[in-house]
Amino acid sequence: MSGSICAIVGCGRPLDTKGYCRSHYRRLWRHGDPLGGSPPRGKNLGPCFIKGCDEPSDKKGMCNAHYLRMRRYGRTDPVRRTELNVCGNPHCPGRNGIDKHLDYARDPEKFKARSQKWRDDNSERYRANIARYLADEDVQKHARERTKKWTRSNPERKRAMDKAFAEANRALVTSYKAARRARVLRATPVWLTSEQWVAIRAVYSEAESLSRETGIRYDVDHIVPLQGKSVCGLHVPWNLRAIPRDKNNSRSRVWLSEHADTMDDLTT
């Protein structure tokens, strides 16, 4: 019976039981007539009216796939997964995220009040959710990238914010500077020769000269960080270099094994 089709004229579906396809056999079993009951879905309604679709229509002149897209997303063309993140957040939960954004657009105050009420009634759970969210590595990476992008796009505003923070928190900034000087002092070996001290001052002079010539602020960077996560470097001439400030602020403080090649080149 392989390759046989349903006995009902025009059906064309593969044979299932007693000469009929599964759909017509169920109608025969329920109504005593293979054509009894409601007509099969998609039959006698013509093809889907969407251009280029040859599937039979199911509801409102569309096939099942196009009808579901229209119902869920308001359009019939394919919807990519990335398009569901309507807020731009990679953690936006798909269709539920769209529903939430639509609710917010209809009545922002009602949405805020409802959210605030839930936070008040579930304060411990809310704090746990926030802590778990902020601890996620992808979230932290996204936040760092977003901050770097904003800093590059708003250099003047960033400098103004840093200046305002320093003026409002003089004691805190002073403590940071003191801690930095202490780290440098602890990382400076007592066995440095006078020639090596001259080499250290030369690196700082180079950074100042490059800043004046290029108009870009240069800093003296420790190749092996003084306070790294896995290893701490020394304040010695072969561990110093002059690099742009933005590069110094964005570089990783994690010492990787492949960096050893760079140190070998600097010390030879």
Image (cartoon, rainbow, N blue to C red):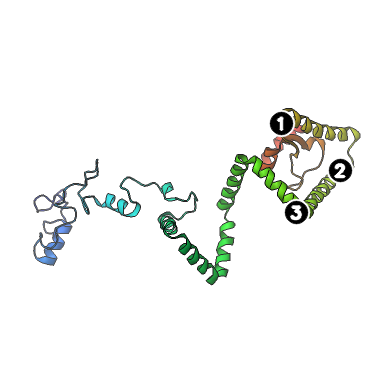
Locate residue 44 relative to residue 196 in the image: left or right.
left
Judging by the rendered image, the residue that carries numbered circle 3 is 169
**How far across and how far down the image is residue 229, in percent?**
71, 49
Q: How many marks?
A: 3
In this view of the protein, which residue sits in the foreground, 219 or 192?
219
Q: Is residue 49 left or right of residue 126?
A: left
**Which residue is disc 2 drawn over?**
189
* For marks 2 and 1 on the same chain, the one whose residue lies earlier in the sequence: 2
Residue 83: x and y, percent? 42, 47
Looking at the rendered image, the disc whose residue lies closer to the viewer, 2 or 3, is 3
Which corner quadrant holds the C terminus? top right
Q: Quadrant of residue 264?
A: top right
Residue 218: which quarter of the image?
A: top right
The amino acid type, in three-letter code, at marker 2 is Pro
Q: Which residue is mark 1?
A: 215
Amino acid marked by disc 3: Asn
Earlier along the polypeptide chain: callout 3 or callout 1? 3
